[in-house]
Image (spheres, rainbow, N blue to C red):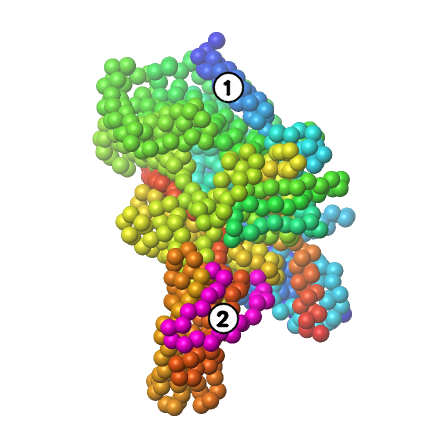
């Protein structure tokens, strides 16, 4: 059949580049492999040139695929499934890029793009390490290319191609018509949760973090392969630091997205997707520390290999966890296994993990190590302990996150207990305590051996200062987290003391140890940031307060256990100020986005103590695409020391709210009183106006306006002003409502001092919403901490790159 | 034995202890019959919303009380009480994972995880239905 209106050329071109990228990466891998194995220099050069050509072809292909896919999405070519499934005509241009990371194909493509960028950089910089390192990177490119290949092997389709046509993918009668495309008016749209600015920047950063972990991994493998043990650590260190900085930023940007646009009430929920991205970071940071130990003392090279290999394998494991759908029952945002087979994702994990660890095991004995053991007064000893703790913490988190996988393998049916967050927190709090102390103290130790006098003299003042500061915080900070008993509260206090210690001691070290040279103190600055993060996390989570305790509703306790769940949701009736914590909150108005079913709710806050006023506008997608329901985006008011954070949890169901009551006639004279079910009202005034200068009204037209004062039983009164337009004999009444009293007034007729009213009492008048509100104290410490940590790491990268450069120059001179 | 080995042993022992205590704190997935056999123990029920029964929620009077009936694949049913706001697309969920415990005759739920046809993931069936609806409207 000939279909009309299709644009098939971009798809054909796309298919071509997909195939080309697969072939090019195969050639690049093989050629780089031969380069390493070549016996003679000329042979190696020939292979290397071929490999470079192949990799650059790969780069061109991947960028072309990206460009073509963007072209298809941008032009709304809905004959392509990817464009139809992930975008729509109403989608703002700034979110078009987000379509890439909503689907499996797009996110693997993004990963591949970052490998291309990093690979190109390596080709120009890595010198003699280029061939072995790029063999690994190119091999990863083969694996990623299979993910978007969509090639059939017998009956199994390998990967999911982004250029498949909708009509080939879906079996629907609509496709029997040649003009089916003209019937598809719009695409399926982007998930509204992703229509957020954080979602434009968070995935690229996170994926750059994921992608970059391959480079320290590749260097470690290259070291094993070429038997240049240890030498690889020099160029690998800046890369590992880069990876840690980017991955850390990406993970915390995810936290910021969760905080600002998801309604699970915080930045971290120990959700499997979050855990899976944090665990590789922990292991990578442990690897960086053992690498530093090796550089300075020659110890821990074996551990460095192990940690850097593991970090990358954990990235692959996370990919499997979050994309295979095996976590479905435990995560709100685990992806489904749609498109790419679970077995394919498992294969991706094993194809790297098994050979890498086998290789490590084979070469283990040959990796140099120092038999003499470290002094307990040495810096390296405690750095190693810290790395070990980071690794064990990572192990604990990943095992706990993998419960569904464990169930699958062993046929068990375990799941997280009642309080998921506490199951993690009660372990991680001790990790924080130990890491806090180690971070504070270890810099004051010297490599190899430290004199106790020297150490004591240097550490004494920071210790005293931090004890003073932290006792102020604990003493007056009113940190009183009772939910899990005194033991846990004690642990929080202790962790707080330790993390304050980490901040103070490292800040002091910049001057005591580094004489204030900031360029050299990247490590200390990163540690200060890390300590601040810990302080921010501890205070904001242990002092997080619910503001929206239910005070307006009638709370009926049901059984004993209802005490455990006091009402955290508060209902606000439009126009009625309601007490919430220190605030009087009023639901003022709502408005709708002109293009989407996105509603904005204006909430006016007034502080009862300081009479400070502000407005928050949480929004929500209501009945999006015919799916009844609500997707809420929170809004927050930021102060330097806390945030007021609120989001909508429930809205009235329009179906149940249909108006069935009718107007009751009432004839009133000025000053008359009448009753309604909840009180009475008085007609206070009745005026007539003509010569109204508003458009559409002739000079002879009149407007009558009534002023009615409503006295409700609960001793509040309201003014209502219905009016009636008399346009040369044609009457147009304009109703007025008193929302909180469910009253509607309509002025029907006026003669002299008498007026005919219609009065209606209707439930549908009552507009209300239910919300949840929190106060997060000191959340800014967390964000500032992240920023400082990343800055510190970047300073270290710059310094390490410079050091490597000068040491290379030195080598050249001596040659 | 080296110091580092001792430290390693201690840490590994600690890790094992943590993992064991963690496994003890985990609960299990249950059917309704299974949950009824273990009153007072926190479990995760895998069930569906009984659409023939009444869903009670009145945000005006109490935004923190939701009552509904859950049925599982074996046909058992149980009344559920949830002291929180009603998840907006409860009626449209395909499957519910309810965390909580049996309390006398009802299931006291502390957390509801919903599996919806179209909220967090793209469901091609739903999308197809939308597409068909477009077509019918145009004809």
Along the line of sight, the residue nearer the viewer: A491 or A76: A491
Q: Quadrant of the N terminus of chain A?
A: bottom right
Q: Could you classify mark 2 by the number of other residues whose Cα lies within 10 Å: few (under 14), some (14-19), or many (20 or more)? A: some
In the depicted structure, whether residue A501 falls above or below residue A618: above
Instruction: Say which quarter of the image contains residue A167.
Output: bottom right
Residue under mark 1: which chain is it in?
B
Q: Chain of mark 2?
A: A
Whether residue A669 is in magenta: the answer is yes
As drawn, B83 above or below A680: above
Q: Which residues are magenta?
A: A657-678
Q: Looking at the rendered structure, which numbered label has been put on residue A759?
A: 2
Looking at the picture, tell me which residue is in the foreground, A294 or B90: B90
**Residue at x 60%, y 41% (from the top left corner):** B81
Work out whether A343 lies above or below B125. Answer: above
Left or right position of A294 against A452: right
In the rendered structure, the answer to whether residue A196 lies left or right of residue B131 reads left
Q: Position of residue B44 (x, y in %)?
A: 63, 36
Rendering coords of residue A359 (x, y %) = 58, 28
* Closest to the observer, A118 or A646: A646
- Decide if residue A100 is on the left or right side of residue A521: right
Q: Which residue is tagged 1?
A: B14
Measuring 34% from the left and 85% from the top, which residue is drawn there? A693
Looking at the rendered structure, the number of numbered marks drawn on it comes to 2
* Residue at image point 42% right, 24% down: A486
Q: Is residue A141 visible?
A: no
Report whether residue A702 is seen: yes
Q: Is residue A99 magenta?
A: no
Q: Residues within 10 Å of mark 1 (few under 14, many from 20)?
A: few
Q: Is residue A604 above or below residue B36?
A: below
At x 41% / y 44%, what residue is drawn?
A547
Mark 1 vs mark 2, CA separation in Å:
73 Å
């Amino acid at each position: 059949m000939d279909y009309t209106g299709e644009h098939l050329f971009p798809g054909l071109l796309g298919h071509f580049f997909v195939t080309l990228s697969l072939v090019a990466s195969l050639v690049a891998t093989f050629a780089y492999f031969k380069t390493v194995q070549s016996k003679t220099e000329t042979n190696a050069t020939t292979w290397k040139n071929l490999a470079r050509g192949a990799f650059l072809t790969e780069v061109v292909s991947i960028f072309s695929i990206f460009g073509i896919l963007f072209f298809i999405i941008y032009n709304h070519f809905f004959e392509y499934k990817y464009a139809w499934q992930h975008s729509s005509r109403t989608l703002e241009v700034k979110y078009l890029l987000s379509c890439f990371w909503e689907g499996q194909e797009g996110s693997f493509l993004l990963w591949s793009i970052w490998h291309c960028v990093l690979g190109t950089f390596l080709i120009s910089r890595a010198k003699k390490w280029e061939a072995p390192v790029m063999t690994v990177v190119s091999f990863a490119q083969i694996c990623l290319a299979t993910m978007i290949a969509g090639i059939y092997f017998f009956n199994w389709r390998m990967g999911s191609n982004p250029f498949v046509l909708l009509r080939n993918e879906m079996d629907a009668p609509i496709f029997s018509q040649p003009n089916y495309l003209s019937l598809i008016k719009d695409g399926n749209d982007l998930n509204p949760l992703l229509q957020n600015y954080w979602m434009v920047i968070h995935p690229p950063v996170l994926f750059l973090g994921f992608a970059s972990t391959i480079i320290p991994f590749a260097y470690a493998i290259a070291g094993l392969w070429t038997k240049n043990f240890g030498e690889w650590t020099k160029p690998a260190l800046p890369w590992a630091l880069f990876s840690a900085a980017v991955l850390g930023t990406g993970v915390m940007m995810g936290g910021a997205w969760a905080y600002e646009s998801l309604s699970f009430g915080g930045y971290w929920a120990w959700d499997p997707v979050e855990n899976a991205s944090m665990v590789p970071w922990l292991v990578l940071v442990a690897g960086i520390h053992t690498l530093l130990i090796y550089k300075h003392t020659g110890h821990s090279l074996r551990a460095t290999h192990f940690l850097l290999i593991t970090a990358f394998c954990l990235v692959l494991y996370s990919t499997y966890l979050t994309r295979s759908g095996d976590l479905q029952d435990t995560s709100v945002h685990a992806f489904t296994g749609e498109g790419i087979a679970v077995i394919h994702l498992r294969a991706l994990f094993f194809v790297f993990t098994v050979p890498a660890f086998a290789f490590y095991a084979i070469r283990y004995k040959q990796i140099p190590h120092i038999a003499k053991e470290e002094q307990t007064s040495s810096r390296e000893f405690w750095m190693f302990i810290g790395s070990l703790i980071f690794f064990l913490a990572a192990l604990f988190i990943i095992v706990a996150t993998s419960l569904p996988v464990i169930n699958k393998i062993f046929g068990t049916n375990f799941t997280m207990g009642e309080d998921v967050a506490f199951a993690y927190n009660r372990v991680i709090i001790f990790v924080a305590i130990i890491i806090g102390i180690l971070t504070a103290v270890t810099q004051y130790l010297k490599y190899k051996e430290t004199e106790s006098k020297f150490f004591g003299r240097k550490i004494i003042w920071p210790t005293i200062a931090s004890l003073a500061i932290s006792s102020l915080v604990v003493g007056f900070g009113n940190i009183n987290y009772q939910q899990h008993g005194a033991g846990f509260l004690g642990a929080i206090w202790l962790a707080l003391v330790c993390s304050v210690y980490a901040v103070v001691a490292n800040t002091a070290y910049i001057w005591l140890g580094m004489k204030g040279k900031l360029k050299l103190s990247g490590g200390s600055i990163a540690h200060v940031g890390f300590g601040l993060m810990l302080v921010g996390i501890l205070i904001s989570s242990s002092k997080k307060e619910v503001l929206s305790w239910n005070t307006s509703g009638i709370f009926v306790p049901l059984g004993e256990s209802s005490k455990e769940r006091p009402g955290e949701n508060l209902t606000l009736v439009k126009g009625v100020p309601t007490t919430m914590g220190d605030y009087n909150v009023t639901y003022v108005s709502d408005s709708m986005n002109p293009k989407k079913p996105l509603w904005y709710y204006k909430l006016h806050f007034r502080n009862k103590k300081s009479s400070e006023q502000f407005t928050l506008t949480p929004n929500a997608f209501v009945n999006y695409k015919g799916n009844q329901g609500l997707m809420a985006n929170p809004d927050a008011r930021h102060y330097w020391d806390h945030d007021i954070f609120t989001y909508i949890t429930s809205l009235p169901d329009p179906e149940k709210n249909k108006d069935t009551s009718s107007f009751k006639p009432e004839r009133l004279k000025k000053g008359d009183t009448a009753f309604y079910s909840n009180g009475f009202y008085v007609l206070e005034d009745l005026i007539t106006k003509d010569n109204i200068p508003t458009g559409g009204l002739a000079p002879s037209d009149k407007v009558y306006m009534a002023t009615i004062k409503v006295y409700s039983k609960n001793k509040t009164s309201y003014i209502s002003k219905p009016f009636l337009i008399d346009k040369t004999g044609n009457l147009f009444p304009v109703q007025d409502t008193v929302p909180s009293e469910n009253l509607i007034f309509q002025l029907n007729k006026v003669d002299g001092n008498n007026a005919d009213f219609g009065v209606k009492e209707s439930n549908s008048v009552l507009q209300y919403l239910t919300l949840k509100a929190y106060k997060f104290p000191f959340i800014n410490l967390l964000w500032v901490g992240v920023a400082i940590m990343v800055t510190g790491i970047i300073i270290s990268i710059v310094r390490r790159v410079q050091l490597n450069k000068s040491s290379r120059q030195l080598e050249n001179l001596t040659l | 034995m080296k110091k580092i080995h001792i430290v390693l042993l201690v840490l590994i022992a600690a890790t094992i202890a943590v993992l064991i205590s963690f496994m003890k704190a985990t609960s299990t997935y249950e059917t309704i019959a299974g949950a009824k056999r273990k009153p007072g123990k926190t479990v995760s029920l895998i069930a569906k919303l009984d659409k023939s029964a009444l869903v009670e929620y009145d945000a005006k009077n109490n935004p923190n009380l939701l009552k509904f009936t859950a049925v599982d694949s074996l046909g058992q049913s149980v009344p559920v009480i949830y002291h929180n706001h009603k998840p907006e697309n409860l009626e449209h969920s395909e499957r519910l994972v309810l965390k909580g415990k049996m309390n006398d005759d009802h299931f006291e739920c502390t957390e509801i995880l919903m599996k919806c046809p179209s909220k967090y993931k793209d469901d091609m069936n739903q999308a197809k239905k939308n597409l068909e609806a477009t077509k019918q409207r145009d004809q």
